[in-house]
Amino acid sequence: MQWGGEIRYGGQQWGNADSNHGKNFFAVGSDGGATGDWSTFDNFSNRVVPLKQWLCVEWHFDGTLMEQRFWIESAERTKLFASRTVHGGAKVDYVFPQFNELALGWMLYQGGTTPAGFDMWIDEVAIDDQRIGCAN
């Protein structure tokens, strides 16, 4: 089955009007496809995404098992686990797309706004069929 959506991992600003409003958290989500446009946030043990600090971030996508996992500094963030039946979208199966592209960087979804005063630095990128882990 071909699926036209995308898998998204990254940091997003919490948009709800609560005590976390305006803070940046890691999130997993999807744009398009049968499950719709959704994001599941991880409050990183009540820590926002740290500023001016290097982080080792790892993703694992398993198309055979239809699941994805995420680690920060070698600690798995289980709130960011997603599978065919465990996800934040519509109550239908989440079908992984055929992987043919990887995009790294910053995405601004709100039209008409210009971000100011922040940078994102990527030091190294490694792709493998096995988990590499973070160097200590």
Image (spheres, rainbow, N blue to C red):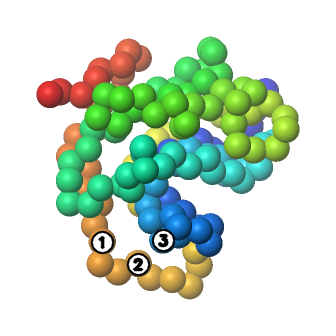
Pick whichever, 10 or 73, lies toward us.
Answer: 73
How far is disc 3 from disc 2 in space, using C-alphas? 14 Å
How far is disc 3 from disc 1 in space, using C-alphas? 14 Å
Q: Residue at x 63, y 15 (%)?
A: 65
Left or right of 4, for residue 117: left
Q: Which residue is mark 2?
A: 115
Binning the other alpha carbons within 10 Å of mark 1 as few (below 14), some (14 to 19) or many (20 upward) gives: few
Marks 3/1 in contact by CB < 8 Å: the verdict is no
Q: Earlier in the sequence, mark 3 or mark 2?
A: 3
Report whether residue 8 is seen: no
Q: Residue at x 46, y 34 (%)?
A: 77
Residue 9 in the image, given as x and y percentages of width and height: 50, 45
Q: Which residue is mark 1?
A: 118
Mark nearest the camera among 3 and 2 is 3
Residue 49 in the image, given as x and y percentages of width and height: 36, 54
Residue type at mark 3 is Gly
